[in-house]
Structures are given as structure tokens and as C-alpha cells.
Image (cartoon, helix red, strand yellow):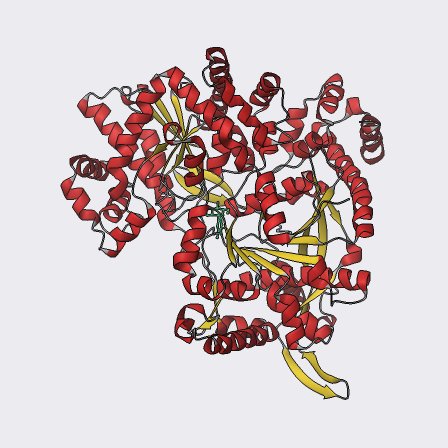
Amino acid sequence: MDNFATDIKKYLEKIFGNTIDEASERQIYQALMVITRDRLAEKRFESNKKLKESQQKRVYYMSMEFLVGKTLRNNLYNLGYEDEIKHFLAKHGFSLERIYNIEPDPGLGNGGLGRLASCYMDALTSNDYPIMGFSILYEFGIFKQVISDGWQQEYPDNWLDLGRYGLLYRNDEEIEVKFYGNTKEEWSSEGLHIRYEDYTAIKAEPYDLFISGYDSDTVNVLRLWKSKATGGFNMKLFEKGEYSKSLESEAIAESISKLLYPADDNDNGKALRIKQQYFFTSASLQQIVKNHYDTYMTLDNFAEKVVIHINDTHPSMCIPELMRILMDEYEYSWDKAWSITTKTFAYTNHTIMAEALEKWSVDLFQPILPRIYTIIREINNRFCKWCNDIGAAGELDEMSIIHNNVIRMANLCIVSSYSVNGVSMLHTEILKKDTFKSFNRIYPGKFINVTNGIAHRRWLGQANPELTRYLNKLLGVDFIKDLSSIDKLLEYQDDKAVLEDLENIKNIKKLQLAEYIKSSTAIKVDTNSIFDVQIKRLHEYKRQLLNALHIIYLYRMIKFNGLKPYPRTFIFSAKASSGYVMAKNIIKLICSISEIIEADPIVREYIKVVFLEDYRVSLAEKIIPAANVSEQISQAGKEASGTGNMKLMLNGAVTLGTMDGANVEIHNAVGQDNIFIFGLSSEEVEELFKNDYRAIDYYNNNQDIKETIDFMRTLDNGHTNFNYIADYLVSTDPYMCLADFESYKNTQKIVEDTYQDKGKWNKMSLVNIAKSGIFSADRATKEYVEKIWKIEKIK
Ligand code: GPQ
């Protein structure tokens, strides 16, 4: 750790005029953040030097979201400084754990998609691959959720207050991005020039977050763009005496990077969102192209040296933007520019849900980005013509990029990228056979699968040091370096002592979580109870409602039918998009059930419901290691992959799930006997949907469903009732909770019975840990490297 301790002392003296013994925790925090950042900057210089020399191909990862999670622990862990700093601080009376708590979660994402991007940055850096991430420096990340009387309330997340110390402002690399205006075609002796007129320019300021790797020399960068008015306020307006108007234009410019849209898996088609997308893709592309040109003095070899990965369609304006830069700024012909572009982009699709597939109305889009629009239109014209030529004109209703006056961004991505991938086996199959069937026919081989993976160093190494230490000693293999070696644990599946040790560690983590639950909700939970966990964004398709319905069923059975189940604690945590009424009602329902149970001296002996507010990366790190049961109960065919399922499995939770997303791969890995699968398959869901699913029939024909829903209607305290949800369940629910209820209920009973056979349960848990190797982000990113990007490690 050389002179890290000295650096801390010096920083405190220089910045605060304090010795370490006079310092506050807040000051220590700032010192650690800044020194760590500067260490990484130095390390970055070295690895970047090698990268420049080797002139190798690089990946640029474009994503509207990076759910980074707290950085300080991760960086100290990766740099190998953690223990020494802990001791050094302890000598001066500070707890490193408390310092870690000061750091806000950089919540620059909504959920799975954003967290995946960060897991991949971490894994690629640990494996010495050259990658640079690009996104937006949202002043306000995902809102802070407060539950008040059972209702979600949203508060701004002013994370930069304390979070900014990890960022490095690169004022030398500012870029201008242009909106609105017109373009004029001008012919001269040298050919056609496009001149931009009457546009509004906005400045993009780069802020770099360094990404460290575990046991690696590489440091990569996540570049976050912040929007600024060009040149302060508008002097012309100012001179005209329109002072407030001039400030207004500044405020408009700065609003672009103000906040993260809190809608997950949902496209809400707002003008500001178009501006955000173009703002960060244009700034990033301009910079990438400039760097390339400065290095090679040509762009002819662009696609040989650059891969641009598009994380879902949100950054898809990269595509027309590259075309624009090549043609308008470097005077490439359409054909040459197109040939470079179509060798540069790779696209990952993360959803098949219609409401999440981005579509922009031409009327909204065209005035904001006139030049980008004409390029998209031309891409589409040429694509449609080509389809005519190859006899695919009949499928243009499905495939054309612009259709009924809307631009379908997924179609743009598929047409323009050399690779399209889904994120689990089932998801990719559905893309190929259903959602993008015609594309798959005309572009054979373009669609491939890369099943998602997770950063096990964070989700096991850092979140569960107790289990990590134990496995390290037991197995004697470095599974933190290479998770596939964790399968050595299988040798102990019948070792009673090991199984008991694992149970004891789980109990330690349950105890820690129980303390957190008590402090944040005042609910006392029994750590001998089954910790049954459903943590993810709140969405109808993820079916928190099915879980809640089953809890209401249990409540009734305990209260009125003398049922005495094995004690269970149902733990929920989830944010709902602020405009999503049903999701907010479901949160209210869960919180109400929790309250009703707490007030019932009989029922609360058996079941408890806890809703933990403000779900975020750092809270997930507390919950996941303590889970016994992992609820992955989305309607089959709807969850593209899921990644929480992998994190929970890695920590020894057993999955209770549908055959959906990566649950299928988990099922294949652990085998039938080590997972609880229930419900309709995705084909059965399709079938039932086509044959007109009638929820009311399930209500009429199933006594338990009928009684549970009738009972739900009696949960009326004068202020709130749940008739709205009950009505939905028996009529319009497209996710068919009632169709899977019976199967879910029966499987829950099996879960309960199995848990009581401790030997059997512990073995299941062990097998889950042992088989989690393939879900490492190291494996997933290696597949991206080999199948899609074709890049090499930094030499
Ligand atoms: N996902 Cl399209 C998001 O979190 N946000 C999105 O906008 C879209 C997808 C998720 C998806 O729902 C999960 O099934 C995946 O595991 C995750 O992306 C990462 O692929």
C-alpha cells in the first residue's frame, strides 16, 4: 500500500488543516475518495500507455444507465488496500465500514440493464480488456424511495453532493452537440457539403469515473457527460434586457443531464429523453472518431480498431450519428460510410415487451434532430429497396424502420449492426422465432445468445466476506479470480460438517439483515424462519402480486383454518416508476399485508412480511447473502434474463421460479432436484393467450383462489381497499397470476417441507453455490470478446 497512509494525512492537512486525530469521518471519507481516484488515475496512465502503443482494437460500451454501486469498497478491495487501511484507520479510532456508509450509491440506472453494464465494466477490467463506457452524468440518479403509510414517495437523489469526489473533470475534452435547425446542401468543385444553420449548440462536459480491476494492471474509464449552456448565458438576449430569458436558455441546456428517467422496461416517448439520447451519443461518437483520426490520420480502418456496443436501443442514435460524422465532417460517400458503420456496431436486446421497444414519433423526432432524421430515413429507404430485391417486401410491415410515422429503434439497430444478441437462451429463441422472425430469416447468423453474468467479486467477495473466507479455506482454490473453480465445493455435498458450516454462515447473514430490518422498519423477524426474498423493480410482469396473493392465502388459512406453517419471513424491496399506478398499488398492498399481520398475534407467529424501502445496489448487498429462497416468478417468456436470480444462487439461496429467462439455465446447471420450478411454460402461456385466457374461470373453479380474492376485498380500512387489484386479477391481468396460482401454492408447500429437512436443504444450497460458476460476468464478457468483439487483452 506504500504511502497511502501518508497521503491521507497530507490531504487532511492540506485541505482541512487537520491532523488525522482531529478529522471528522466526513473528512476521512473525502480523503479516501480523492486519493483512491488519483491512484487509479496514475494506474490508468500506465495501462493507457500500453494501449496506445499496441494500437489494438477497443470496445466502447454505450449505455444510458450504469448502476455503479458504491465505489470505495470496490476500489480498495481491487487495489488490495482494504485490510491495511482498515487497520490504519482503526488505530486512529475510525471504522472503515462507517466511512463506506458515507458514500452515496451512484444510482445512474434503474435496474438490471444498468447493473449489467457495471458488472461488465468490472469484469472486463479485471480481465485486462480495453473498454470505455459512455453515459450521462445525471445530476439526480434514480429517486430515493420513502414509504409513507404504505405508499411510495419519491425524493430527489442528490448524489453528487458526496459522490463527486470519485470523478475527474476533463475540461480539455469538451464537445459541442447540436440540436434543431436546418441543413443546407452546398455543391462546390470538391463535391457536396452539408451546412448546418440556426441550430442550438449545447456543451458536453466529460467527467471520468475510473473502473478498477481485481488483480489486474488495467484501469478503464466510464465517461459521463454533463450538459452545459455554451458560453454561459446568451449575451444577445442579455443586451436586449432579457436577462431572465437568457438564464432560461441556460437552464434548458442544463436540464438535459438533470435526471435519470425512472421508467424501467418502458418507453415513454418524451422529447427530453430524445435529447438525452442524442446528447450523450453524439458527444461520445465525436470523441471516439476524433481520437481515432488523431491516431491514424484516417477513418478507413475505423471498424478494424473500434467496436461500439449498444446496450439496448437507448443509444441507437450512435448509428446515424456515425454516418453523419463520416459524411458531413469527413466527406465519406454514403456507401463507404455505410460499409464502416455496419461493421462497427453490435447491439444487445434486453426485452421483448412491446411497451419497452422504443419507438419515436417522426413528428416529435424530426424537428429536434433534422439531419439525424434524414439519415435514418435514407437508411430505411435503402433497406426497404433491398428487401424488395431479395423478395422480402411482404415482411416490411414488421421490418421497416419507419412505419406508420414512427421510428422503430430496434429495427434500426438490427439493420445497422453486425451482431444482435439476446441475454438468455430462452430470450434469444423468442427473438429469433417470434419478435424478430423476419429479420432472423433475412440475416441468418446475425442473432446470437450471450447469457448474462454478474460481478461475483462484488456479489460474493464483498457482499459476503464470511462465506468467501470460509470457501477460500475449505476449497483452497482462488474462486474470486476464477469463479468456475467454485464447483470444487460439490465434493462436499454430503459432508455434514461443511453443510452445517454453510448453514451457520447463512444464519450470521440472516442475523445481520434482521438487525437492519429492525432498525429500518421496527419489525422483529425470527432468523429461524425461512427468509423468502423477492427484490427487483416493481412490474406487473415480474408478478410481485402473485407472491402477495399467496401470502394473503396463507394469512386466511392460518387465521381461519388452523394452518400452522413453518415460520417464514417474506422480504420485498422494489421501486416503482413514478407514473406507474398499478405498481404503486401493489406496494401499498404488500405494506398493508405487512401491517395487518403485525397486528395479529396469531398469524405473526408464522408469517411476516417486510417491505424494505429504497431498493438499491447497497441494499441488495445486504439482503442477498441472507436469503434462503429466491423468488423468480415472472410470467414465462417475459423476463429477458434476470440477474438477481444469479446473485442469490451464488449466495446459496434456492430458486423458486418459472421457466423464464436465465432461470432456465439455472435449472440446467443445478438440476431438477435443486430448484423449485412451477407454472406454465412460455409456449403454454402463448397458447393460453391465443385461446383467450379467462381469469374469471380460475376464480370460479378454484376454491382457494375464490376465497383469497374475496378475502382481499375485505381488507378495507375505510381509507384504502384493494378492489382495484382484485378486479384486475379476475379480468384483465395479462400476466395471468391466477393461471399459475395453484401451481405456485403447491410448490410453496414443497419449499416449506423441504426447508424443514435441514440436511436436504443445505445440500441444495451448496449445489447452487457450486454451480454458479457459469454465471460469472467473466464468462459472459469472454463470450462477448470471442463471439462479437474480437478484441485482445491489453498487452
Ligand atoms: N432490462 Cl429493456 C432493464 O432492466 N431495463 C430495460 O430497460 C430493459 C431491460 C432488464 C431485463 O428486464 C432483465 O430481464 C435483464 O436481466 C436485464 O435487463 C439485463 O439484461
Q: In this view, does 784 lie to the left or right of 542?
A: right
The picture places residue 502, in percent across and down from the top left corner, at: 49, 18
**13 or 391: which is nearer to us?**
391
Q: For the point 81% across and 60% down, which residue is it?
A: 295
**On-image quarter of the C terminus:** top right
Let me know if residue 679 appears in the view.
yes
The picture places residue 343, in percent across and down from the top left corner, at: 63, 63
The residue lying furthest to the top in this view is: 497
Q: What count of labels does the image hold?
A: 0
Q: Is residue 706 left or right of residue 476?
A: left
Q: Is residue 122 left or right of residue 263?
A: right
The picture places residue 409, in percent across and down from the top left corner, at: 50, 64
Q: For the point 41% across and 40% down, which residue is it?
A: 664
Q: For the point 29% across and 19% down, which residue is it?
A: 601
Say which quarter of the image contains residue 670: top left
**545 or 599: which is nearer to us?**
545
Residue 764 against residue 730 in the figure, above or below: above
Say which quarter of the image contains residue 121: top right
Let me know if residue 716 appears in the view.
no
**125 or 97: which is nearer to us?**
125
**On-image quarter of the N terminus:** top right
Q: For the point 49% across and 74% down, which residue is it?
A: 363
Q: In this view, does 67 lie to the left or right of 793?
A: left
The picture places residue 114, in percent across and down from the top left corner, at: 55, 47
Residue 736 against residue 36 in the figure, above or below: below
